[in-house]
Amino acid sequence: TSATGAPLSRTQADPPPRRFGDAVIEARDLHKSYGTTPVLRGVDLDVRQGEVVALLGPSGSGKSTLLRTLNHLEGLNGGSVLIDGEPIGYDLRGAELSERTIARQRVSSGVGMVFQQFNLFTHLTVRENVAGPLRWVHGVGKAEADTRADELLAMVGLSDRADARPRQLSGGQQQRVGIARALAGNPRVLLLDEPTSALDPERVAEVLAVIRRLATESGLTMVIATHQLRFAREVADRVAFLRDGVIVEQGPAAQIFDAPEQPATRRFMRSMA
Ligand code: ADP
Ligand code: MG
């Protein structure tokens, strides 16, 4: 099974056209604490349509927390997130929202998520993992959801494993299912949380190949937390460096890699070299 499957397509009911350069994510002054421990301490992040942003930073700097607040998998203690101009996790009039309303916002915001540990449904087949959320969350009928799942599995090079269970797959294959599942709802933005960190070294390349194709061929807006610096440099339009819950430096990939201004960024780059 190769990672270079069928051509990429975004053929399902496309959302209204957006222009390259429109803001897709506008995160302002995000604050998040666990108990009394502050984890995000005033993060601002804008991501434009079609942009690929790499989120770098040491372990514990808040990368996962930041990604999870963008999707409102974690609530905020302060600040705001707009996805395509729509609030998520709160109401523009400041009203308290029910979990149900937040869940609806999360679906309509169209933020797909790829997790470090894949988070596949172990009791479902590969095809069901991809088709299931389309049916349960997006109300797509079974036949159409299965067709869409098979297209996506072809795209990630897993057509021949559609009827397998996740545990019968390698880590790299499981993560490719995770990517197919995240794409099923035709997201406006895809968040990837260290998508290759849980993989054996020999399985990293096949997953990076799929993400690289998404970045270069589909025009999908992406935020990727990663420790794969060479990959980040290659695919990212912009790099944001997070440390202790603050983005200490961000800019074009070449600038952050070749001429970081902040000592913390320089130290990090040296330590990873
Ligand atoms: P990163 O992804 O950059 O490694 P995280 O966002 O996972 O960073 O974690 C940032 C900090 O928040 C760490 O100190 C971590 O221990 C803490 N943290 C993360 N999730 C939780 C949680 N659910 N409860 C308590 N502390 C947490
Ligand atoms: Mg993390």
Image (cartoon, helix red, strand yellow):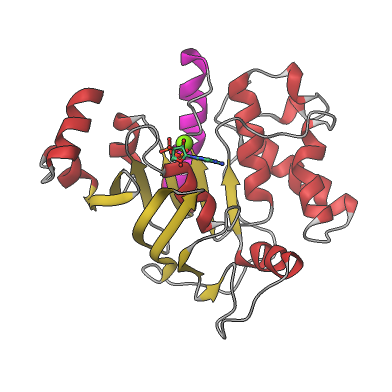
Residue at 55%, 75% (x, y): give it.
86
Dominant secondary-structure state across the stretch colored magenta: helix
- Across and down, in percent, residue 148 comes to 75, 49
Q: Give the total number of marks visible in the rendering.
A: 0
Q: Residue at x 50, y 42 (%)?
A: 192
Is 252 part of what is drawn in magenta? Answer: no
Please determine whether, in this image, residue 247 is positioned above or below residue 166.
below
- Residue 238 in sight: no
Which residue sits at x=33%, y=45%? 236
Q: Which residue is at the front of the view, 14 or 124?
A: 124
Q: Is residue 97 left or right of residue 201?
A: right
Answer with the quarter of the image where residue 97 lies.
bottom right
User: Magenta residues, as a range?
Assistant: 200-215
In depth, the one of 216 and 96 nearer the eye is: 96
Q: Identify the residue at image location x=65%, y=58%.
A: 11
Q: Position of residue 115 (x, y in %)?
A: 58, 38
Q: Nearer the viewer, residue 45 or 111?
A: 45
User: Residue 113: x and y, percent?
Assistant: 58, 47
Residue ranking furthest to the right: 142
Q: Quadrant of the N terminus?
A: top right
The image position of residue 126, as x and y in percent, is 77, 32
| Residue 28 in view | yes
The quadrant of the image that shows the C terminus is top left
The outermost residue toward the bottom is 93
Classify 181 as above or below 140.
above
Q: Quadrant of residue 241?
A: top left
* Closer to the camera in the image, 214 or 135: 135
